[in-house]
């Protein structure tokens, strides 16, 4: 049997398919990397001008607050998101002084992270969310809605400030802890530190609630039969016709109210589960067709109690091994461990509160504005609004013909570039990154250039979750495409968000194009006990749907068998 090759064909000039007009020569001389972690596919104009630019604002606010000394800029090129980091030109003395200021600011934030989250940031986030939730969208005029949008834009941008004020100390804390464990126990496997951090968070609570919903369906024969026999799009109406069906619908609505402000990608233009629960219903249908073990307080195919016991047993072994170390070392470990536990939980929880909830409420406001503009014949459908920029929507001064022509032109461009593979890099080649804790921390989350494959039938990546599994590869570039994955098959995706976690209960393993050992995908895969290889860069392009592959999550390698 011949060994399949993963070598890519040479392309004459990738830029011929992806033309870019630079504002000036200086812009072209910068390094622009495509952001595939947050935006693996093309996005809308509204997503860029509101969501991405708010993220950019949050990044730069945090960088200034912590004296990190860089400025981030995002560009919207042919529908895709590219980012560039600008560093100031400093003398050696100025650079050392700036690094010292940053270290002092970040260390203070690391020590206070739990307090700031619980006592300051989370209450502020909840206040902003309440402002949106309590506003009467249904009865507001277009003028009122536009005024509400203008009034709450600072709130939305503030959420992204908090996001990155939390993100940088969180990642540096986790990096410091994992590096300390590796230094103390150099013979331990790369996942030893993460075993010590496993625990409950908003993502695992959502998994528990979904598992209970599945078991409620199993306990009601009529409900189970409807879910197994009817398409997800039709089952809601059928369930309303019986007492048991209504009981299940009430439980489903309660689940969606708690965990349904979630979308399959970081986006304002994509529907959330509360708007369209089809994905949740399909997941329940899959669980009914292929039943899972009874999951009282399930977090990951294991019980929460088992997960906690596993963590505490590992911690006991580490503490026994540290018994002979000097007291200051033990104290440093214990102090850093406590901070890392908080950070590991927040690595999931901040997405739940900021990315999911904030984007959900902003989408509802925007879509309602779209409904008013549709009623006034300015737009053809409410969803057309997302093809406009924030400024265009706020002005609403263009006539219907102008808006509709603009939207048609942008949709045609989107269709054209959907058939083009966007280059991962534009402008100047990247320079070597410094080997410092900040860069190492970000690499653990975003990943880096994937290791070269050691054989023609291999795809190299990063170890995300330990274990080795063989199975059928299923390529899914969107969550809708993941609907056809069967239990035990291997999900191959560009990246994952918390919404994808519903699949982790029955897939055999996961492979992603982007991310590192602290990416969402890797964290959740470890909770579920399934192997993960992350940050491969091109797995969705190099692997073929239906191939029989082996995922070695311990060493970060995917093999075609």
Image: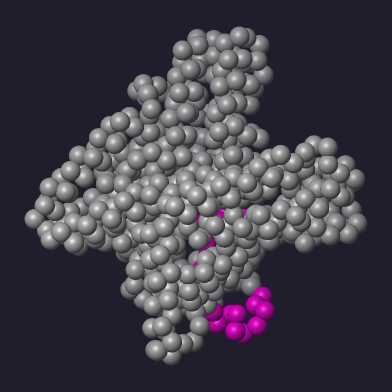
Seen as rendered, the residue at the extreme left is 324
Figure check: 78 above or below 463: below
Figure check: 321 above or below 487: below
What's the image's color scheme?
one colour
* 42 is within the stretch colored magenta: yes
Locate residue 142 relative to residue 440 in the image: left or right: right
Q: Residue 253: x, y in percent?
A: 60, 26
Q: Residue 78 appears in which quarter of the rendering? A: bottom right
What residue lies at 68% left-to-right and 58% top-to-bottom? 154
* 490 is within the stretch colored magenta: no
Q: Residue 312: x, y in percent?
A: 23, 40
Locate residue 493 relative to residue 404 in the image: left or right: left
Locate residue 321 relative to residue 52 in the image: left or right: left
Q: Which residues are magenta?
A: 21-43
Q: Residue 478: x, y in percent?
A: 54, 45
What residue lies at 12% left-to-right and 47% top-to-bottom? 320
């Amino acid at each position: 049997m011949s060994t399949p090759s993963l070598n890519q064909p040479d392309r004459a000039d990738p830029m011929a398919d992806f033309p870019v007009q630079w504002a000036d020569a200086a812009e072209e001389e910068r390094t622009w990397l495509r952001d595939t972690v947050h935006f693996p596919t093309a996005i809308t104009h509204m997503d860029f001008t509101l969501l991405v630019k708010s993220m950019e604002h949050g990044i730069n606010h945090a960088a200034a607050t912590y004296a990190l000394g860089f400025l981030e800029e995002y560009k919207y090129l042919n529908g895709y998101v590219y980012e560039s980091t600008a560093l100031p030109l400093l003398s050696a003395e100025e650079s050392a002084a700036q690094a010292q200021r940053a270290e002092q600011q970040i260390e203070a934030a690391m020590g206070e992270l739990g307090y700031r989250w619980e006592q300051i940031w989370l209450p502020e986030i909840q206040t902003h969310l309440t402002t949106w939730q309590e506003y009467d969208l249904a009865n507001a005029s277009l003028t009122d809605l536009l005024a509400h949008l203008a009034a709450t834009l600072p709130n939305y941008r503030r959420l992204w400030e908090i996001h990155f004020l939390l993100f940088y100390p969180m990642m540096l804390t986790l990096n410091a802890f994992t590096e300390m464990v590796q230094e103390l126990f150099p013979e331990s496997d790369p996942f030893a530190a993460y075993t010590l951090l496993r625990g409950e968070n908003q993502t695992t609570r959502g998994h528990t609630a979904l598992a209970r919903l599945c078991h409620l369906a199993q306990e009601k024969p009529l409900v189970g039969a409807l879910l197994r026999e009817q398409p997800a799009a039709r089952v809601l109406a059928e369930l309303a016709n019986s007492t048991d069906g209504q009981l299940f619908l009430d439980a489903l609505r309660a689940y969606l109210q708690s965990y349904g402000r979630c979308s399959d990608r970081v986006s304002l233009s994509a529907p959330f589960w509360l708007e369209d629960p089809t994905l949740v219903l399909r997941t329940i249908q899959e669980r009914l067709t292929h039943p899972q073990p009874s999951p009282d307080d399930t977090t990951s195919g294991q019980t929460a109690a088992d997960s906690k016991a596993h963590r505490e047993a590992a911690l006991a072994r580490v503490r026994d091994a540290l018994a002979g170390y000097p007291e200051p070392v033990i104290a440093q470990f214990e102090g850093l461990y406590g901070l890392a536990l908080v950070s590991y939980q927040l690595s999931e929880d901040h997405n739940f509160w900021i990315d999911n909830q904030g984007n959900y409420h902003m989408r509802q406001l925007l879509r309602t504005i779209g409904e008013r503009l549709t009623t006034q014949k300015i737009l053809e459908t409410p969803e057309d609004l997302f093809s406009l920029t924030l400024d265009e929507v706020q002005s609403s001064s263009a006539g219907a013909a102008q808006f509709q022509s603009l939207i048609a032109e942008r949709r045609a461009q989107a269709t054209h570039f959907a058939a083009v593979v966007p280059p991962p890099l534009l402008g100047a080649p990247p320079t070597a990154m410094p080997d410092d804790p900040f860069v190492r921390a970000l690499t653990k989350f975003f990943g880096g250039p994937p290791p070269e494959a050691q054989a023609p039938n291999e795809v190299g990546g990063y170890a995300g979750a330990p274990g080795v599994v063989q199975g059928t590869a299923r390529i899914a570039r969107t969550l809708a495409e993941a609907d056809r994955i069967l239990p035990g098959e291997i999900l191959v995706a560009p990246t994952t968000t918390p919404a994808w976690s519903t699949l982790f209960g029955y897939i055999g393993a996961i492979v992603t194009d982007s991310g590192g050992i602290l990416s969402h995908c890797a964290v959740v895969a470890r909770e579920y006990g399934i192997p993960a290889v992350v940050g491969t860069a091109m797995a969705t392009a190099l692997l073929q749907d239906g191939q029989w592959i082996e995922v070695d999550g311990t060493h970060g390698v995917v093999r075609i068998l």
